Image (cartoon, helix red, strand yellow):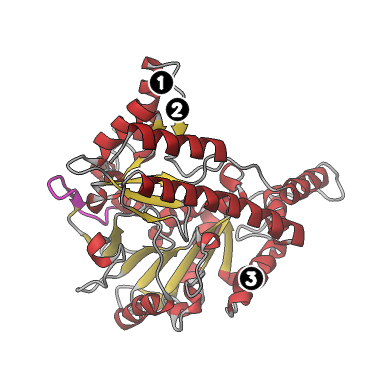
């Protein structure tokens, strides 16, 4: 008899976005003529930039010729892409990295979920609340979170850091010791950011407590305001305590192409039961070379094209397009009487639901009355209840249409 990993029984009944898809599909089957506009899941609608597709075509042609064919590549990524990542994403911010500190992968979601494997199950972890579900669910699967408290809507062994209107949607430092800290800025789902001074407080805490910050900066390219750090490694001391996750999914349309990278500085250490230090960089290399065969050559060649002059301009146009959508959503909701957050340095708008209306109740009402789909805040944690997320990744036509529907049919 095969026994299961019973930690899976501690998970919610279904993944947040799977539940959304189930409800939408049921509504569609009952209302086949409904014109559904999806502003829920963070999938993009703009095509890959021309520079990217041309580079991919060229790489595919290379794979069809014996003299330029490539088999297995390095699990951590080709140097030609890593060099461009370092030169364009880090040196421009005054950050020096070596080639073996950058690991190319098939997505930031995969890496943020998989990275926890390196840590012992006895580590105390902290997450912001609301939070991107993968951080929590992957640790539940590993057995690090304890049981789920249905009344609180939280796991008993996780330290939750509330992000509320009272604290400007920004988490306060833990009041007790934690070993693993998940931070995401610009934040998904709230769209909020930290200043360098605010982020330095987290780095200082981690250095003092020998904690590790798992920093998801997948949306850094959407930052518009000055003084907002693009990478945690702009902060003094961050190389000792932080790992950073980045993605090409939203910035360059790679959601269906899959390419991202993770930065693991050599200074970051974890400790065995006897207190001996071990390089997190070497452990992640060991994990990746065992469980991952690398991103395909055509995809990495396509990703490298993002950093050409043409690629940079085309990516900028895509980001500008989505951020204009964000402005339309943010201002339109405000005009309709809703209280809104985010949408300035991130492609997410975090809105307050009408008084005395739960976020799933608002989801159903919005879908049925306006035929617009968003994401219930409760799906991101207990402190997400009473809020709702809309994304700026739709087409301009659908974004405008969705806001007009909300204005006319869903007054706050």
How far apart, in angstroms, are the residues tagged by discs 1 and 2? 8 Å
Name the spot of residue 36 as percent of width and height, x first. 45, 27
Please give left or right for residue 153 compared with residue 119 in the image. Answer: left
Report the residue at 63% width, 76% height from top: 91
Q: Secondary structure at mark 3?
A: helix
Residue at numbered disc 1 = 28
Q: Which residues are magenta?
A: 143-154
> Mark 2: few, some, or many residues within 10 Å (few <14, many ≥20)?
some
In the rendered structure, find residue 375 and report the number of the disc placed on it. none
Q: Earlier in the sequence, mark 1 or mark 2?
A: 1
How far apart, in angstroms, are the residues tagged by discs 3 and 2? 41 Å
Viewer-proximal residue, 36 or 261?
36
Name above or below for residue 406 compared with residue 294. Answer: above
Residue at numbered disc 3 = 86
Residue at numbered disc 2 = 36
How far apart, in angstroms, are the residues tagged by discs 1 and 3? 46 Å
């Amino acid at each position: 008899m095969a026994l299961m990993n019973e930690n899976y029984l501690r998970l919610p009944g279904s993944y947040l976005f799977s539940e959304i898809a189930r409800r939408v599909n049921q509504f569609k089957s009952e209302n086949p003529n409904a014109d559904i506009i999806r502003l829920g899941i963070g999938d993009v609608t703009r095509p890959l930039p021309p520079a990217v597709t041309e580079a991919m075509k060229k790489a595919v042609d290379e794979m069809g010729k014996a003299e330029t064919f490539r088999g297995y590549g390095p699990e951590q990524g080709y140097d030609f892409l890593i060099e461009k990542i370092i030169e364009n994403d880090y040196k421009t911010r005054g950050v020096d990295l070596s080639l073996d500190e950058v690991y190319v992968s098939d997505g930031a979601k995969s890496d943020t979920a998989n990275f926890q494997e390196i840590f012992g199950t006895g580590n105390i972890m902290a997450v912001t609340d609301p939070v991107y579900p993968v951080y929590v669910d992957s640790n539940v699967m590993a057995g690090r979170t304890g049981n789920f408290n249905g009344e609180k809507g939280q796991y008993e062994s996780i330290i939750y850091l509330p992000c509320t209107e009272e604290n400007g949607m920004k988490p306060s430092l833990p009041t007790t010791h934690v070993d693993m800290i998940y931070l995401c800025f610009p934040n998904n789902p709230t769209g909020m950011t930290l200043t360098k001074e605010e982020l330095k407080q987290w780095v200082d805490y981690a250095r003092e407590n020998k904690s590790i910050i798992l920093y998801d900066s997948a949306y850094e390219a959407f930052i518009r305001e000055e003084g907002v750090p693009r990478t945690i490694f702009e902060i003094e001391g961050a190389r000792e305590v932080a790992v950073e996750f980045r993605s090409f999914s939203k910035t360059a349309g790679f959601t269906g192409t899959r390419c991202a990278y993770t930065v693991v500085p050599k200074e970051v250490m974890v400790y065995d039961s006897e207190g001996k230090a071990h390089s997190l960089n070497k452990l992640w290399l060991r994990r990746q070379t065992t469980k991952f065969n690398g991103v395909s050559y055509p995809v990495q060649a396509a990703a490298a094209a993002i950093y050409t002059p043409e690629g940079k301009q085309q990516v900028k146009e895509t980001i500008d397009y989505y951020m204009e959508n964000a402005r339309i959503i943010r201002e339109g909701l405000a005009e309709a009487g809703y209280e809104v957050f985010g949408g300035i340095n991130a492609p997410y708008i975090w809105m307050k639901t009408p008084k005395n209306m739960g976020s799933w109740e608002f989801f159903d009402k919005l879908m049925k009355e306006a035929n617009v789909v968003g994401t219930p805040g409760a799906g991101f944690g207990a402190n997400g209840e009473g809020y709702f997320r809309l994304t700026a990744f739709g087409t301009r036509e659908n974004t405008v249409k969705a806001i007009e529907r909300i204005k006319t049919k869903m007054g706050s």
